[in-house]
Image (cartoon, helix red, strand yellow):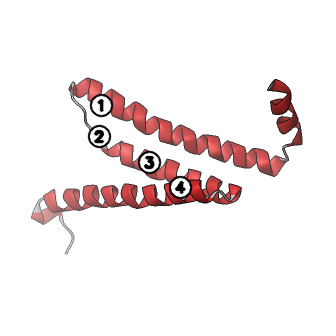
Amino acid sequence: MLSGFAEWWNDLTAVELGWVLIGFAGQALFMMRFVFQWLHSERARRSIVPEIFWYFSLGGGLTLLAYAIHRADPVFIAGQATGLFIYSRNIYFIWREKRQSKPRQDREP
């Protein structure tokens, strides 16, 4: 197993290494959404989804979609593209609610 990894590592080009790093960055963004959700829930002593969850979801999803396209993985592409719609929609709802809850005089015409 280690020899297979060593062989893979030795065969990596600089471009491929860059894509591996992009993939890991996307995974890190995705992981952070759960870390923040867990911390907010612990603090509130109930399950909640903080706004930042959706931003990490969007960032991680976009990064992982780019990686999936590079890898030409149709299953990964379909999963990430679907998720991006959901994350974007939730962010839209958050922005709309914030805009609607602003006092009238603070709104732009």
Q: Earlier in the sequence, mark 3 or mark 4?
A: 3
In the rendered structure, the answer to whether residue 51 lies left or right of residue 3 reads: left
Please report whichever mark, 1 or 2, sits nearer to the chain's N-terminal start.
1
**Residue 57: mark in rendering:** 3
**The N terminus lies in which quarter of the figure?**
top right
Q: Position of residue 72 (x, y in %)?
A: 68, 59
**Residue matched to label 1:** 40
Looking at the rendered structure, which numbered label has been put on residue 49?
2
Q: Quadrant of the image for the C terminus?
A: bottom left
Kindly identify the amino acid type of the residue bearing the numbered disc 3. Answer: Ser
In 3D space, how far apart are the residues under numbered discs 3 and 2 (Cα atoms)?
A: 12 Å
Q: Residue at x 55, y 38 (%)?
A: 28
Visible in this render: residue 102?
no
| Numbered disc 1: secondary structure | helix
Q: Are marks 3 and 2 in contact (CB under 8 Å)?
A: no
* Contact check, label 1 and label 2, Cβ < 8 Å: yes
Kind of residue indicated by mark 4: Leu
- Near mark 3 (Cα within 10 A), the count class, few <14, some 14-19 or many ≥20, is many
* Residue found at the far bottom of this picture: 109
Q: Marks 3 and 1, Cα distance to the nearest angstrom?
A: 16 Å
Measured Cα–Cα span from mark 1 to mark 2? 8 Å
Distance Cα–Cα, label 4 vs label 2: 20 Å
